[in-house]
Image (tube, rainbow, N blue to C red):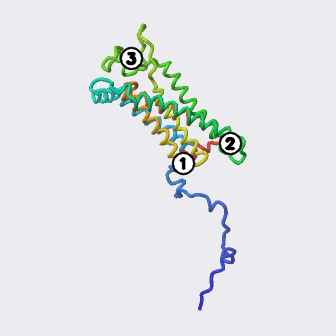
Amino acid sequence: MESAEPNLSVAKANLPWKPTSSALEPRSGSPSNRHRPASLSPSAFDALRLLALPVLGFALAWFVLVPMRGDQWWADRLLAWQGGQWRLGHSLLLETVIHRGGKRLSVLMWLAALGVTVWMWRRPALSSWRRPTIALLLSVLLSTSIVALLKSATQMDCPWDLLGYGGQRPFIDLFATRPVGLPAAACFPAGHASAGYAWVALYFFAGAVRPQWRIAGLWTGLAAGLVFGFAQQLRGAHFLSHDLASLMVCWLVALATYRIVAGDRRSIAQGAAA
Protein backbone atom coordinates (compact mmCIF):
# COMPACT_ATOMS: atom_id res chain seq x y z
CA MET A 1 0.00 0.00 0.00
CA GLU A 2 1.35 3.39 -1.05
CA SER A 3 2.07 5.89 1.72
CA ALA A 4 0.15 9.14 1.59
CA GLU A 5 2.23 12.18 0.64
CA PRO A 6 2.21 14.95 3.27
CA ASN A 7 -0.01 17.94 2.52
CA LEU A 8 2.55 20.73 2.67
CA SER A 9 0.01 23.53 2.34
CA VAL A 10 -1.95 22.27 5.33
CA ALA A 11 1.21 21.79 7.35
CA LYS A 12 2.32 25.31 6.55
CA ALA A 13 -1.06 26.74 7.53
CA ASN A 14 -0.90 24.98 10.91
CA LEU A 15 2.51 26.41 11.80
CA PRO A 16 2.46 28.51 15.00
CA TRP A 17 4.47 31.22 13.15
CA LYS A 18 4.53 32.58 9.66
CA PRO A 19 7.75 32.68 7.62
CA THR A 20 8.93 36.20 6.86
CA SER A 21 11.42 37.61 4.40
CA SER A 22 13.98 37.86 7.17
CA ALA A 23 14.15 34.09 7.21
CA LEU A 24 15.59 34.26 3.72
CA GLU A 25 18.30 36.79 4.56
CA PRO A 26 21.92 35.54 4.77
CA ARG A 27 22.91 34.52 8.24
CA SER A 28 26.23 35.11 9.89
CA GLY A 29 27.46 31.71 8.76
CA SER A 30 26.40 32.07 5.12
CA PRO A 31 29.08 32.24 2.40
CA SER A 32 28.50 35.97 1.85
CA ASN A 33 29.23 36.82 5.46
CA ARG A 34 31.46 34.10 6.85
CA HIS A 35 34.67 36.01 6.00
CA ARG A 36 33.51 39.33 7.44
CA PRO A 37 34.36 40.01 11.10
CA ALA A 38 31.16 40.41 13.10
CA SER A 39 32.40 43.66 14.64
CA LEU A 40 32.87 45.41 11.27
CA SER A 41 30.17 47.16 9.29
CA PRO A 42 30.16 46.57 5.51
CA SER A 43 31.72 49.99 4.84
CA ALA A 44 34.45 49.43 7.43
CA PHE A 45 35.13 45.96 6.04
CA ASP A 46 35.44 47.38 2.52
CA ALA A 47 37.85 50.05 3.72
CA LEU A 48 39.96 47.42 5.49
CA ARG A 49 40.14 45.09 2.51
CA LEU A 50 40.61 47.65 -0.24
CA LEU A 51 42.48 50.51 1.43
CA ALA A 52 44.11 49.67 4.75
CA LEU A 53 45.63 46.32 3.77
CA PRO A 54 47.12 47.51 0.45
CA VAL A 55 48.56 50.60 2.13
CA LEU A 56 50.04 48.47 4.91
CA GLY A 57 51.56 46.09 2.37
CA PHE A 58 53.01 49.02 0.46
CA ALA A 59 54.52 50.50 3.63
CA LEU A 60 56.20 47.22 4.57
CA ALA A 61 57.58 46.68 1.06
CA TRP A 62 58.76 50.29 0.91
CA PHE A 63 60.63 49.88 4.20
CA VAL A 64 62.47 46.86 2.83
CA LEU A 65 63.30 48.44 -0.52
CA VAL A 66 64.23 52.00 0.49
CA PRO A 67 65.43 52.39 4.12
CA MET A 68 66.89 48.86 4.11
CA ARG A 69 68.39 49.37 0.62
CA GLY A 70 66.59 46.45 -0.97
CA ASP A 71 66.46 48.45 -4.19
CA GLN A 72 70.22 48.49 -4.48
CA TRP A 73 70.54 44.84 -3.49
CA TRP A 74 68.17 43.78 -6.28
CA ALA A 75 69.69 46.13 -8.88
CA ASP A 76 73.16 44.84 -7.99
CA ARG A 77 72.01 41.29 -8.72
CA LEU A 78 70.50 42.24 -12.08
CA LEU A 79 73.61 44.18 -13.06
CA ALA A 80 75.97 41.38 -12.00
CA TRP A 81 73.88 38.85 -13.93
CA GLN A 82 74.53 40.94 -17.08
CA GLY A 83 78.26 41.07 -16.47
CA GLY A 84 78.45 44.50 -14.83
CA GLN A 85 76.80 46.35 -17.72
CA TRP A 86 73.19 46.89 -18.75
CA ARG A 87 73.60 44.67 -21.80
CA LEU A 88 69.82 44.31 -22.19
CA GLY A 89 69.27 48.06 -22.27
CA HIS A 90 68.67 48.12 -26.01
CA SER A 91 67.52 44.56 -26.61
CA LEU A 92 64.82 43.98 -29.19
CA LEU A 93 62.55 42.21 -26.71
CA LEU A 94 62.82 44.62 -23.79
CA GLU A 95 63.13 47.97 -25.53
CA THR A 96 61.18 47.49 -28.75
CA VAL A 97 58.57 44.86 -27.94
CA ILE A 98 57.84 45.35 -24.23
CA HIS A 99 58.72 49.02 -23.74
CA ARG A 100 57.53 50.65 -26.94
CA GLY A 101 55.04 47.97 -27.95
CA GLY A 102 53.62 47.65 -24.44
CA LYS A 103 52.97 51.36 -24.22
CA ARG A 104 51.16 51.32 -27.54
CA LEU A 105 49.14 48.29 -26.51
CA SER A 106 47.95 50.05 -23.37
CA VAL A 107 46.90 53.08 -25.42
CA LEU A 108 45.06 50.86 -27.91
CA MET A 109 43.24 49.12 -25.04
CA TRP A 110 42.14 52.48 -23.68
CA LEU A 111 40.92 53.63 -27.11
CA ALA A 112 39.06 50.34 -27.53
CA ALA A 113 37.39 50.84 -24.16
CA LEU A 114 36.43 54.36 -25.24
CA GLY A 115 34.89 53.02 -28.43
CA VAL A 116 32.92 50.41 -26.52
CA THR A 117 31.66 53.11 -24.14
CA VAL A 118 30.42 55.24 -27.04
CA TRP A 119 28.76 52.20 -28.58
CA MET A 120 27.05 51.24 -25.30
CA TRP A 121 25.69 54.75 -24.86
CA ARG A 122 23.16 54.02 -27.61
CA ARG A 123 22.14 50.66 -26.13
CA PRO A 124 19.59 51.09 -23.32
CA ALA A 125 19.96 47.42 -22.41
CA LEU A 126 23.59 48.11 -21.44
CA SER A 127 22.93 51.24 -19.41
CA SER A 128 24.18 49.55 -16.22
CA TRP A 129 27.63 49.22 -17.84
CA ARG A 130 28.02 52.91 -18.69
CA ARG A 131 29.22 54.35 -15.40
CA PRO A 132 31.60 51.47 -14.62
CA THR A 133 33.12 51.79 -18.10
CA ILE A 134 33.49 55.56 -17.76
CA ALA A 135 35.15 54.99 -14.38
CA LEU A 136 37.55 52.53 -16.03
CA LEU A 137 38.52 55.08 -18.67
CA LEU A 138 39.00 57.82 -16.10
CA SER A 139 40.96 55.61 -13.75
CA VAL A 140 43.48 54.49 -16.37
CA LEU A 141 43.89 58.02 -17.70
CA LEU A 142 44.28 59.58 -14.24
CA SER A 143 46.68 56.90 -13.03
CA THR A 144 49.13 57.32 -15.89
CA SER A 145 48.80 61.11 -15.81
CA ILE A 146 49.44 61.37 -12.06
CA VAL A 147 52.48 59.11 -12.34
CA ALA A 148 53.82 61.30 -15.16
CA LEU A 149 53.35 64.43 -13.04
CA LEU A 150 55.05 62.81 -10.06
CA LYS A 151 58.01 61.82 -12.22
CA SER A 152 58.59 65.47 -13.07
CA ALA A 153 58.12 66.60 -9.49
CA THR A 154 60.29 64.04 -7.66
CA GLN A 155 63.40 64.49 -9.83
CA MET A 156 64.85 61.06 -9.10
CA ASP A 157 67.43 59.42 -11.30
CA CYS A 158 67.27 56.12 -13.13
CA PRO A 159 69.77 53.45 -12.03
CA TRP A 160 71.70 53.66 -15.31
CA ASP A 161 72.52 57.32 -14.52
CA LEU A 162 73.96 56.59 -11.07
CA LEU A 163 77.48 55.93 -9.89
CA GLY A 164 78.04 52.21 -9.56
CA TYR A 165 75.41 51.42 -12.18
CA GLY A 166 77.05 52.83 -15.28
CA GLY A 167 76.35 56.53 -14.73
CA GLN A 168 78.06 59.54 -13.19
CA ARG A 169 75.45 61.00 -10.83
CA PRO A 170 75.26 60.50 -7.05
CA PHE A 171 72.20 58.85 -5.58
CA ILE A 172 69.78 61.43 -4.15
CA ASP A 173 67.07 60.21 -1.79
CA LEU A 174 63.45 60.94 -2.58
CA PHE A 175 63.02 63.72 -0.03
CA ALA A 176 66.58 65.06 -0.16
CA THR A 177 67.40 68.41 -1.77
CA ARG A 178 68.76 67.95 -5.26
CA PRO A 179 72.09 69.75 -5.73
CA VAL A 180 72.08 72.80 -7.97
CA GLY A 181 73.57 72.06 -11.37
CA LEU A 182 72.68 68.36 -11.35
CA PRO A 183 70.82 67.51 -14.59
CA ALA A 184 67.06 67.03 -14.35
CA ALA A 185 65.71 63.52 -13.85
CA ALA A 186 62.29 61.91 -14.15
CA CYS A 187 62.38 58.26 -13.13
CA PHE A 188 60.14 58.00 -10.05
CA PRO A 189 57.51 56.57 -10.05
CA ALA A 190 57.89 54.21 -13.00
CA GLY A 191 55.98 55.55 -15.97
CA HIS A 192 56.04 52.42 -18.13
CA ALA A 193 54.93 50.16 -15.29
CA SER A 194 51.96 52.48 -14.72
CA ALA A 195 50.77 51.71 -18.27
CA GLY A 196 50.22 48.18 -17.02
CA TYR A 197 49.29 48.71 -13.38
CA ALA A 198 46.65 51.27 -14.36
CA TRP A 199 44.54 48.33 -15.51
CA VAL A 200 44.09 47.04 -11.95
CA ALA A 201 40.97 49.21 -12.33
CA LEU A 202 39.52 46.18 -14.14
CA TYR A 203 39.05 44.67 -10.67
CA PHE A 204 36.54 47.35 -9.74
CA PHE A 205 35.02 47.41 -13.22
CA ALA A 206 34.33 43.67 -13.01
CA GLY A 207 33.00 44.07 -9.48
CA ALA A 208 30.34 46.40 -10.89
CA VAL A 209 29.30 44.45 -13.98
CA ARG A 210 30.47 40.82 -13.62
CA PRO A 211 31.75 40.03 -10.10
CA GLN A 212 32.99 36.61 -11.20
CA TRP A 213 35.53 38.35 -13.45
CA ARG A 214 37.08 40.60 -10.81
CA ILE A 215 40.07 38.36 -9.95
CA ALA A 216 40.86 37.93 -13.64
CA GLY A 217 40.65 41.70 -14.03
CA LEU A 218 42.98 42.26 -11.09
CA TRP A 219 45.57 39.83 -12.42
CA THR A 220 45.39 41.39 -15.88
CA GLY A 221 46.58 44.70 -14.45
CA LEU A 222 49.10 43.12 -12.09
CA ALA A 223 50.60 40.90 -14.80
CA ALA A 224 50.93 43.77 -17.27
CA GLY A 225 52.58 45.98 -14.66
CA LEU A 226 54.95 43.23 -13.54
CA VAL A 227 56.07 42.47 -17.09
CA PHE A 228 56.50 46.15 -18.00
CA GLY A 229 58.26 46.91 -14.72
CA PHE A 230 60.64 43.96 -14.72
CA ALA A 231 61.64 44.68 -18.31
CA GLN A 232 62.65 48.20 -17.30
CA GLN A 233 64.53 46.92 -14.27
CA LEU A 234 66.53 44.61 -16.53
CA ARG A 235 67.37 47.58 -18.74
CA GLY A 236 68.58 49.62 -15.75
CA ALA A 237 65.77 52.15 -16.14
CA HIS A 238 64.11 51.74 -12.75
CA PHE A 239 64.55 50.44 -9.23
CA LEU A 240 61.95 48.05 -7.87
CA SER A 241 60.55 50.73 -5.55
CA HIS A 242 59.72 52.86 -8.59
CA ASP A 243 57.36 50.13 -9.78
CA LEU A 244 55.93 49.64 -6.31
CA ALA A 245 55.06 53.33 -6.09
CA SER A 246 53.34 53.19 -9.48
CA LEU A 247 51.25 50.24 -8.37
CA MET A 248 50.17 52.05 -5.22
CA VAL A 249 49.21 55.18 -7.15
CA CYS A 250 47.22 53.17 -9.68
CA TRP A 251 45.38 51.21 -6.98
CA LEU A 252 44.42 54.28 -4.97
CA VAL A 253 43.29 56.16 -8.07
CA ALA A 254 41.15 53.21 -9.18
CA LEU A 255 39.62 52.86 -5.71
CA ALA A 256 38.81 56.57 -5.48
CA THR A 257 37.51 56.80 -9.05
CA TYR A 258 35.08 53.93 -8.66
CA ARG A 259 33.96 55.18 -5.27
CA ILE A 260 33.10 58.56 -6.80
CA VAL A 261 31.84 57.57 -10.26
CA ALA A 262 30.04 54.35 -9.33
CA GLY A 263 28.18 56.38 -6.74
CA ASP A 264 26.32 53.65 -4.86
CA ARG A 265 29.48 51.78 -3.78
CA ARG A 266 28.34 48.74 -5.74
CA SER A 267 31.68 48.07 -7.39
CA ILE A 268 33.52 48.65 -4.11
CA ALA A 269 31.26 46.28 -2.20
CA GLN A 270 31.51 43.61 -4.88
CA GLY A 271 35.27 43.87 -4.84
CA ALA A 272 35.49 43.55 -1.07
CA ALA A 273 33.35 40.42 -1.18
CA ALA A 274 36.07 38.62 -3.13
Q: Label 2's element? A: helix
The one nearer the camera, 166 or 207, is 166
- In the image, what residue type sits under mark 3? Ile
Residue drawn at the location 33% of the way across and 27% of the way down:
75
Q: Between disc 2 and disc 1, whose residue precedes?
A: 2
Question: Which label number is shown at residue 213?
Answer: 1
Image: 42 above or below 80 = below
Residue 123: name its quadrant.
top right
Query: As drawn, is 101 to the left or to the right of 139?
Result: left
Q: Position of residue 102 (x, y in %)?
A: 48, 32
Residue 76: name its quadrant.
top left
| Viewer-side label of 1, 3 | 1
Image: 178 above or below 254 = above
Q: Label 3's element? A: loop
How many discs mark residues in the rendered view?
3
Q: Position of residue 83 (x, y in %)?
A: 27, 26
Q: State yes or no: discs 2 and 3 in contact (Cβ < 8 Å).
A: no
Look at the image and tell me in which quarter the N terminus lies.
Answer: bottom right
Residue drawn at the location 54% of the way across and 48% of the way down:
213
Classify 10 Å Cα crowding around label 3: few (below 14), some (14-19), many (20 and above): some
Image: 253 above or below 149 = below
**Residue linked to disc 3:** 172
